Amino acid sequence: MVEGMEGDSIGFVSNKRRKSFKNTGKGTRTFQWRFFIGCVLVESYFVYNFFNSRILLDNMQDLMLEMNSTSISKAWYARTFNMLRWLIIDPDLPMSNKPSQEVIGP
């Protein structure tokens, strides 16, 4: 139904297409929410590991004090047990510039 070549009137009403913007659909929004939730989960994993390692390091620091005192006392008892063995072999052996009978026992 076009009447003229000059474009006087067009018989059909032309429908203009609405401009659709990018990244505004429902699928894009769900992807963005899933991506955001995934980022939050990954970040929370690293925060959990940070605090967990801090707690473990604090516990290890407390244990190091105990291990140091244990290792000091362990050396003393090892020395005493060695002196007891030598006392059985040689009762006249001096221990810390004293007779071994005075240092080890009554």
Image (tube, rainbow, N blue to C red):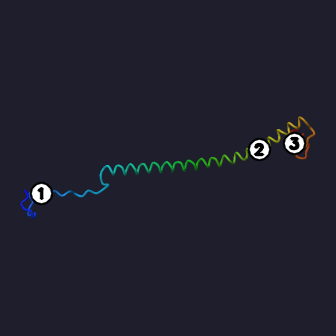
Q: Residue at x 12, y 57 (%)?
A: 13
Q: Crowding near pointer 3: few (<14 within 10 Å), some, many (20+)?
A: some
Badge 1 is on which residue? 13
Residue type (three-letter) at the residue carrying disc 1: Val
Amino acid at circle 2: Ser
Task: Say which of 73 and 31 sits in front.
Answer: 31
Cα–Cα gap, marks 3 and 1 = 117 Å
Inter-mark Cα distance, 3 to 2 = 17 Å
At label 3, the amino acid type is Val
Q: Which mark is residue 57?
A: none
Crowding near pointer 2: few (<14 within 10 Å), some, many (20+)? Answer: few
Q: Position of residue 31 (x, y in %)?
A: 36, 49
The residue that disc 3 covers is 103
- Quadrant (top left/top right/bottom left/bottom right) for the C terminus: top right
Q: Earlier in the sequence, mark 3 or mark 2?
A: 2
Q: Position of residue 50 (x, y in %)?
A: 54, 50
* Residue at the image point whose x is 7% and y is 62% from the top: 4
Which of labels 3 and 2 is toward the front? 2
In the figure, 102 relative to 23: above or below?
above
For this rendering, which residue is in front, 73 or 47? 47
Q: In the figure, is residue 58 to the left or right of 30?
A: right
